[in-house]
Image (tube, rainbow, N blue to C red):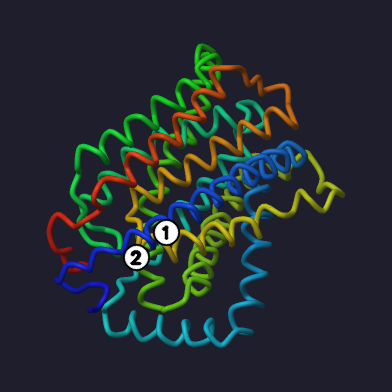
């Protein structure tokens, strides 16, 4: 079946779904680390957009070397071109990188003030509801997914759990205002994961799909940075000397590649919830082991992190079968 076909995709096995959940959870921990790195880079450069350009740009450079150097990557590029020419993959389905670029930009702009945990709750609030809508609309490679009671309860419990985890920070008006940016980024993540999954199926290579994501995201960030330079001038900070602060891009490669590879087994909602669980656990550990002025984890934070795992399990046990065949891409 082509990615834009009208036949419903087969339901993935429980083993593949469980494996996908495990990989997504691990990648979520990596995203929490990436958020801390890019947030610190934004503070050092005194410009969140510049930090996002550095992060995405370095990731793109790695992929420009890696993809043509691997047989699978080269085959993926040929298959991708063929899918675009044949119309089985639409150009708009290759634009997921714009949402990824916006997420990385919000990391650099807000984490220095919010902390990783509060940043995560804002992303979760946007991502949970958006994932349900994206699955229901059939944007992802699994086609339309029914909004079952278990899946809806899992999404709702995730939001409640993360709100509990950072509830002591939500009374700060400045925090609420800044949280609007990662909230919007969370809405975009679900759509990004869905269309990147389509690109992966068309190309037959998760690395090729990741290259498309980083190419589009870097171009979007360069345009934004050009506007930023024209309005505000050069960043007030300087490039840091610590190599670890340049690992955000490579970490992003791992996250995007894993998401593109497993979304066809998990669906967008379950992928998002498992990633969220990893993010929350990773954010709590970072804020405890490497605290900043913005991080104050307490008992409710730990309880909220535990509840996110319960929410993922609840959604995973709910049948992921399609509600109806996916509509052709337009």
| Point 47% across, 76% down: residue | 205
Q: Is there a contact, CB below 8 Å, between mark 1 and mark 2?
A: yes
> What percent of the width, then of the height, locates residue 111?
62, 33
| Point 28% across, 50% down: residue | 134
When asked about the image quadrant of residue 56, the answer is: bottom right
302 and 145: which one is in front? Answer: 302
> What percent of the width, then of the height, locates residue 232?
65, 39
167 and 157: which one is in front? Answer: 157
In what quadrant of the picture does the N terminus appear? bottom left
Is disc 1 placed on a helix, strand or loop? helix
When asked about the image quadrant of residue 68, the answer is: bottom right
Query: Is the residue 271 above or below the residue 287 in the image?
Result: below
* 186 sits left or right of 264 in the view: right
> What percent of the width, then of the height, locates residue 267?
32, 55
Q: How many marks?
A: 2
> How far apart are the alpha carbons under marks 1 and 2?
7 Å
* 296 sits left or right of 170 in the view: right
76 and 11: which one is in front? Answer: 11
In what quadrant of the picture does the C terminus appear? bottom left
Mark number displayed over residue 96: 1
| Point 41% across, 43% down: residue | 273
* 273 sits left or right of 285 in the view: left
> What percent of the width, then of the height, locates residue 226?
61, 53
Crowdedness near tag 2: few (<14), some (14–19) or many (≥20) residues, C-alpha within 10 Å: many
Tag 2 residue: 93
């Amino acid at each position: 079946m082509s990615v834009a076909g009208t036949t419903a995709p087969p339901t993935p096995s429980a083993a593949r779904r469980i494996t996908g959940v495990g990989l997504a959870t691990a990648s979520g921990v990596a995203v929490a680390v990436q958020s801390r790195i890019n947030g610190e880079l934004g503070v050092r450069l005194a410009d969140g957009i510049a930090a996002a350009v550095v992060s995405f740009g370095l990731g793109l450079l790695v992929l420009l070397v890696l993809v043509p150097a691997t047989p699978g990557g080269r085959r993926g590029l040929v298959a991708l071109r063929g899918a675009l020419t044949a119309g089985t993959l639409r150009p708009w389905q290759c634009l997921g990188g714009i949402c990824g670029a916006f997420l990385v930009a919000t990391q650099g702009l807000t984490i220095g003030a919010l902390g990783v945990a509060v940043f995560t709750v804002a992303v979760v609030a946007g991502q949970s509801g958006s994932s349900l809508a994206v699955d229901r609309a059939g944007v992802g490679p699994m086609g339309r997914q029914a909004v079952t009671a278990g899946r809806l309860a899992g999404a709702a419990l995730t939001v409640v759990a993360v709100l509990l985890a950072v509830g002591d920070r939500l009374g700060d008006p400045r925090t609420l205002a800044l949280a609007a940016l990662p909230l919007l980024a969370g809405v975009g993540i679900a759509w990004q994961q869905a269309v990147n999954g389509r690109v992966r199926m068309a190309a037959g290579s998760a690395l090729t799909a990741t290259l498309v994501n980083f190419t589009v995201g870097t171009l979007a960030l360069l345009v934004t940075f050009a506007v930023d330079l024209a309005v505000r001038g050069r960043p007030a900070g300087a490039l840091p000397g610590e190599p670890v602060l340049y690992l955000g891009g490579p970490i992003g490669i791992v996250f995007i590649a894993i998401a593109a590879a497993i979304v066809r087994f998990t669906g967008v909602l379950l992928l998002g919830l498992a990633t969220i669980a990893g993010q929350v656990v990773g954010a709590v550990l970072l804020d405890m082991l490497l605290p900043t002025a913005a991080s104050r984890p307490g008992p409710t934070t730990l309880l909220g992190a535990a509840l996110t795992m319960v929410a993922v399990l609840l959604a995973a046990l709910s049948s992921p079968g399609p509600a109806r065949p996916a509509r052709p891409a337009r």
